[in-house]
Amino acid sequence: MSPADFVSPLRSQETDVLIIGAGPVGLFAAFQLGLLGLKARLIDTLDRPGGQCAELYPDKPIYDIPGWPVISGQELTDRLIEQIAPFEPEFRFNQRVDSLTRRPDGSFQIVTDAGEVHVAPVVFIAAGVGSFTPRRLKLGGIEPYEGKSLFYAVRERAEFEGSDLVILGGGDSALDWALDLLPAVKSLTLVHRRDKFRAVPHTVRAMEAAVAEGRMNFVMGVLERLDGDNGELTAVTVKSETGSTTIEADRVLAFFGLNIELGPIAEWSLDLEDGKQIRVDTAKFQTSTPGIFAIGDINSYPGKLKLILCGFHESALAAQEAFRIARPDEKLRFQYTTSSSELKRRLKVA
């Protein structure tokens, strides 16, 4: 799937549970919440679901997921997406949660770096080892262009329509967006330091076919210079072993990997251990702030194991308490998916 396949319209500021992080644990939390009739909205700094699992080792085999003798990080993500589809969760990608505050009515308000405001009575922090932020170009004088004609993520596809677009990078994000945006742009040039790529094989083949057919260009080299005025690009210069090449461009997308950091979470007055992990109880996996839960690698408690399957267990218990907070006037009934007609209706298998 392309990152664009997960872009969903924001139907309302409010939802039942806001999940910060769309890795495997965040995705399974959406499933557990869905079983209880709670709507989830997932917010992630990446441009697609899967978190570290899909971004850093999509093809790496995982051997300790129950029921799967072996499964890759991307395959696990795909199965989890398929599992939560009946509940129609909302996704907000390429956004970092900058602030989290409690409102007078007891609910929580989250504001992202894209200016979006989200409100819910419950927040799940499933941020893994921290937030992923794009690595900036190491080139002098780029500041006027950043956010104006030089970007590190696609937030609005319309920003690139009809443009002369240069995409820098050789991984999944670079090639996926190159193929996705290709029909909408005036011209597209992919720039990578070598002719070997880190994307999945079928994506590489699709990109190479587009180049062979003349629908997009490929230049091997590294970015040397940006040309333009007042943050508006007119061209870029790429340096290779044989010299320099100037390419007409008014938009640049740079995908040079990610930095991992705890980010604004450290400022949310939660009980932290060594400034890196959030302490929780082991009955509900709630933090020191009622209504805020931490699941997966981001949390800490006696006996904690940093395993995906442990995060799944934490999600299930946290979801039970989340229901009590989000639906204080309703009785929580424990049900099994094998026998409950209500759960089967929610799963759309009845």
Image (tube, grey):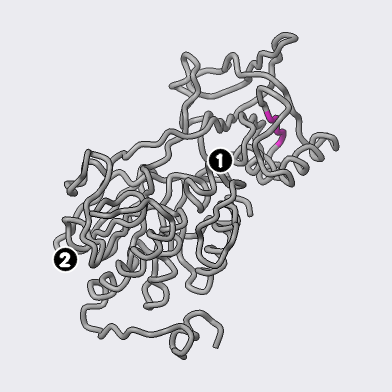
Q: Tell me if 43 is positioned left or right of 183 in this view.
A: left
Q: Is residue 156 above or below residue 340?
A: above
Q: Residue, x 69% and y 14% (percent of image)?
A: 240
What type is the residue that disc 1 sits on? Answer: Glu
Q: Callout 2 environment at 10 Å: few (<14), some (14 to 19), or many (20+)?
A: few
Q: Tell me if 3 is positioned left or right of 302 in this view.
A: right
The disc, 1 or 2, on the residue closer to the chain's N-terminal end is 2
Q: Residue, x 66% and y 26% (percent of image)?
A: 192
Task: State the residue lying farthest toward the top.
Answer: 243
Looking at the magenta stretch, what is its main secondary structure?
Answer: strand
For residue 224: magenta?
Answer: no
- Give me the C-alpha separation between circle 1 and circle 2: 38 Å
Identify the element where label 2 is drawn. loop
Q: Residue, x 59% and y 61% (percent of image)?
A: 69
Q: Position of residue 114 (x, y in %)?
A: 39, 44
Question: Which residue is under mark 2?
Answer: 105
Q: Position of residue 143 (x, y in %)?
A: 43, 21
| Boundaries of the magenta span | 186-190
Which mark's residue is nearer the viewer, 1 or 2? Answer: 2
* Depth order, front residue of 41/274: 274
* Marking on residue 159: 1
Q: Tell me if 51 is positioned left or right of 162 in this view.
A: left
Task: State the residue lying farthest toward the left.
Answer: 104
What type is the residue that disc 2 sits on? Answer: Asp
Q: Position of residue 179 (x, y in %)?
A: 70, 43
Q: Position of residue 31 (x, y in %)?
A: 44, 69
Q: Is residue 334 above or below residue 324?
A: below
* Marking on residue 280: none
Q: How many marks?
A: 2
Q: Is residue 54 above or below residue 236?
A: below
